[in-house]
Amino acid sequence: MASARLADLWDDAVANSLDEPGKLLYRSNLLGSDLRITNFGGGNTSAKVKATDPLTRQEVTVLWVKGSGGDIGSMKLDGFSTLYLDKLEALKGLYRGLTHEDEMVGYLPHCTFDLNPRAASIDTPLHAFVPKIHVDHVHPDAVIAIAASRNAEKLTQEIFGGEIGFLPWQRPGFDLGLKLSKLATENPHLTGVVLGGHGLFTWDDDAKACYQLTLRIIQKAADWLEAKASKPAFEGSKTTSLPAAERAAIATRLMPEIRGRIGKAQAKSGHFTDAPEVLEFVNSNALDKLAPLGTSCPDHFLRTKIRPLVIPFAGDIEATIASLDGLIEAYRADYAAYYARCKHADSPAMRDPNAVIYLVPGVGMLSFAADKATARIAAEFYVNAINVMRGASGVDTYVGLPEQEAFNIEYWLLEEAKLQRMPKPKGLAGRTALVTGGAGGIGRAIAARLMQEGANAVLADIDQASLDAAVADFGKLFGKDRVRGIAMDVTDEASVIAAFEETARSYGGIDIVVNNAGISSAAAVEDTTLELWNRNISILATGYFLVAREGYRLMKNEGNGGSLVFIASKNGVSASAGASAYCTAKAAEIHLARCMALEGAPHGIRVNVVNPDAVLRGSKIWQGEWRQQRAASNKIGEDDLEEFYRKRSLLQRSVYPEDIAEAVYFFASDLSAKSTGNFLNVDAGNVVSFTR
């Protein structure tokens, strides 16, 4: 069944209100909004714009081109580099040939217009030297399928009839820019070019015409592939997809097992997809033939590594898990051999030898990276690669990027320099935390603090409305990939188990569990009903046990340690009259943590406790009856409670949710790597809760 046609989204009313840079941004965002046109972060766009030189006040031509990094679908105007076109042309006189390609990148900053700090990309010469005002470079699956075919040049001619030219594979840079310029200049009838194994360039002197040309060429390629492709795709099915629920269950089991084996040096985040394209490929007869060939487009390759790891699955999950050590070690050895074969004298040291993409017949695709967004995007790139392999193998023979060329890109010194300039990962990067009561004041503060340090956060709460609001807020602050919300009742064993299964499926595993769900109650012993007693024990003791047990099981299974943090209370170490049920349950929490610390230590699982006191701001337990009871007990007004507790403390200071969050971060992070079985009071000083 043919996919939907590309939509022309150009709106003259919008475009006519924009200046030339604005039209370039508009065009770029439209092109980047459809992954069939270009992948995330892939491709670039440009326009040659007349502007006034700030020094000479003379009119000059400025190349606006997407700068290094960024994504044309989401970029803003500050994502473009701006360079004097005449200075870029002057660089031709400095070029000393292919062996001196990289030095040309060092000259690009000298061409900067108006002190624009956005670094120019390696593709800048490809845009600068095309003799047209507007240039689009995109990575459409349909065109790359042609570009990655054995007879790519012949197919280009057959499909486009001379309207689109062809250049064989070559790493982007100054020389390719010169060749592209020569082709366009000597063949003025051309409207673009297919770059072998890479993508598509199109050009025009009008912004709208350039956009529509790009769509037309991509659609023409897609239509041709659809009409000519052999059926069934990938030589038909070898494996049948399992039912959706079984696929999810197997991914839930496999992801922590893989993550535990590949994340010992640095925690990784995982992603699972069983999209139809993925299942078609992993279930196919051609899987074992095509997967080892790797990807063709450099953007695909850089995100997905030299090749994926195929994990055979024949219905026995335990046997599959038992095979992982051998499969992963074999992949690492193969990657090390690839590095040894291809390295140069000045190549950077070998990087992480683990696979990024894991293909499981009957189940789907798993991906792992330093953070969730990168893992998800890697999966999207491999879906692009699957589409390319389907198209190419359906009309010709698919050809992956040659091994040495792949290495030269992966270990390119310019790429290494870019990696070295990137900020160092934050302390909790790649780690995943589950916070119960995550939608409340203290829970939200804890999640925010952990996310600030790079963690993924799973907020578990029984209040769906508050949960949705918290997830939406954190999504805006940290990105949607970094946060999940799960409706969970800590007193319901099945609910707790399901929450950890969803966490494993969403992120690959767990590193931090914060037991924070809470209630409050006050009653004299003789007035304490069995219902009130059971409610406190059920939520604060049994609930903490269920959550801690499931988190502990998952951490132990992964084998990389972890941190459990219990939010108890000052009342857990000092008795309070009129709150026997609450105090007893809190004391149980603290002792449970100590018991678990004993069992967890051999596995690197640390268990510690934070004891707050009188955290009123943003706290659900200080709303309603509990607030009234505490005020009445102390013979003060409800509005005077915070001041009362402040004055009661030794330090005469109020305690806020952020203070509790800071203590949790300490226990969750490597700052407390040698601490387990401890508790930390965060109560501004209260002599009755001093440790003894």
Image: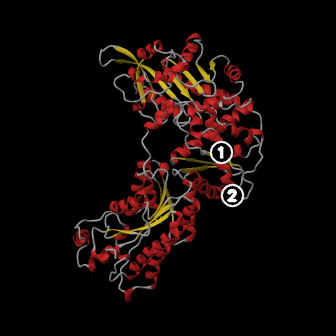
Viewer-proximal residue among 670 and 213: 670
Q: Amino acid at mark 1?
A: Tyr
Badge 1, how many Cα within 10 Å: few under 14, some, many 20+? some
- Assign a secondary structure to mark 1: helix
Earlier-in-chain disc, 2 versus 1: 2
Q: Residue at x 65, y 44 (%)?
A: 333
Residue bearing the label numbered 1: 331
Q: Residue at x 42, y 41 (%)?
A: 423
x then y, percent, for residue 11? 48, 30
Q: Amino acid at mark 2?
A: Ala
* Camera sees residue 69: no
Badge 2, how many Cα within 10 Å: few under 14, some, many 20+? few
Viewer-proximal residue among 178 and 220: 178
- Give the residue furthest to the top: 186
Q: Which circle marks residue 322 in the picture?
A: 2
x then y, percent, for residue 122? 49, 26
Viewer-proximal residue among 169 and 53: 169
Q: Which circle marks residue 605 in the picture?
A: none
- Give the residue furthest to the front: 345
Viewer-proximal residue among 378 and 639: 378
- Assign a secondary structure to mark 2: helix
Q: How is the image coloured?
A: secondary structure
Q: CA distance from mark 2 to mark 1?
A: 16 Å
x then y, percent, for residue 155? 70, 23
